[in-house]
């Protein structure tokens, strides 16, 4: 017999809380990840995001936080999710291979000093690994958000935040939590004047 729905709800919430609590041990790593993105933005670089599926949705969510604002009116920072242009994505998948849908965009758009944030719950997605390798080859900083044992991405990125969970749903929940924390660190740096913001002709 299946469990009562209320039992499943309580268990899911408890499990989510436990995974997030375990991330307290990652505070220094998360701070270092924030410094990496702040460094790129302070030098006039752009933050690019790549991910598949639910992670693709997180990419555009986090890019919007930087281009718009997180909580204060100080952001207006250059950020772009490479997951949203359907013409580019379908052309590259059709004419080449899906594994290249992000790496070819990186090749065209990313410059030395930019930052690439790569989201993969397993750390082994071929299209994400290809994008990270391409970005590193072009002199960009790379930040990975992954889970489980970190996968291949853990040893490939300049900084990699590995969520201590085996479940995709719990990992994705923590990725957006980490993303919001990174946005808060960036926003604080912008407010402190450590990152130039684009305020011309804006209220």
Image: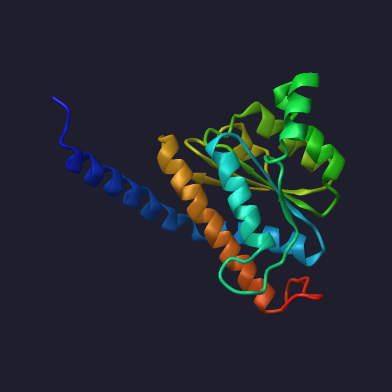
Q: Quadrant of the N terminus?
A: top left
Q: Position of residue 180 (x, y in %)?
A: 53, 59
Residue located at (42% from left, 39% from top):
169
Which quadrant is the C terminus positioned in?
Answer: bottom right
Height in image: 196 above or below 56? below
Give the x, y percent position of residue 85: 73, 39
The residue depicted at 79 percent of the width and 48 percent of the height is: 140
Front residue of 31/189: it is 189
Res 146 → quadrant? top right
Q: How is the image coloured?
A: rainbow
Q: Is any atom of residue 96 visible in this view?
A: no
At x 80%, y 76%, the residue is 201
Q: Is residue 14 left or right of residue 123?
A: left
Query: Horizontal placement of 76 versus 26: left or right?
Result: right
Q: Nearer the viewer, residue 59 or 117?
A: 59
In percent of width and height, residue 39 lies at 74, 63
Q: Quadrant of residue 104?
A: top right
Question: How far across and down, in percent of the image, does residue 47 sit?
Answer: 73, 54
Q: Residue at x 66, y 27 (%)?
A: 126
Q: Is residue 165 above or below residue 36?
A: above
Report which quarter residue 198 is drawn in.
bottom right
Q: Which residue of the protein is positioned furthest toward the left in this rendering?
A: 1
Q: Is residue 154 visible?
A: yes
Number of numbered labels in the structure image: 0
């Amino acid at each position: 017999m299946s469990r009562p729905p209320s039992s499943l709800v309580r268990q899911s919430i408890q499990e989510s809380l436990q995974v997030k609590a375990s991330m307290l041990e990652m505070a220094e790593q998360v701070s270092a990840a924030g410094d990496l993105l702040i460094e790129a933005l302070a030098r006039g670089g752009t933050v690019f995001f790549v991910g598949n599926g639910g992670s693709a949705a997180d990419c555009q969510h986090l890019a919007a936080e930087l281009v718009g604002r997180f909580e204060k009116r100080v952001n207006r920072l250059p950020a772009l999710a490479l997951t949203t242009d359907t013409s580019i994505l379908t052309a590259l998948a059709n004419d080449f291979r899906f594994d290249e849908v992000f790496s070819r965009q990186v090749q065209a758009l990313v410059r030395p000093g930019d930052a690439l944030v790569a989201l993969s719950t397993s750390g082994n997605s071929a299209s994400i690994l290809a994008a990270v390798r391409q970005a590193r080859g072009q002199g960009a900083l790379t930040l990975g958000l992954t889970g489980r044992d970190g996968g291949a991405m853990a040893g490939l990125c300049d900084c990699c935040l590995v969520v201590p969970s085996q479940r995709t749903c719990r990992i994705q929940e923590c990725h957006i939590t980490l993303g919001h924390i990174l946005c808060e660190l960036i926003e604080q740096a912008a407010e402190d004047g450590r990152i130039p913001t684009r305020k011309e002709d804006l209220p």
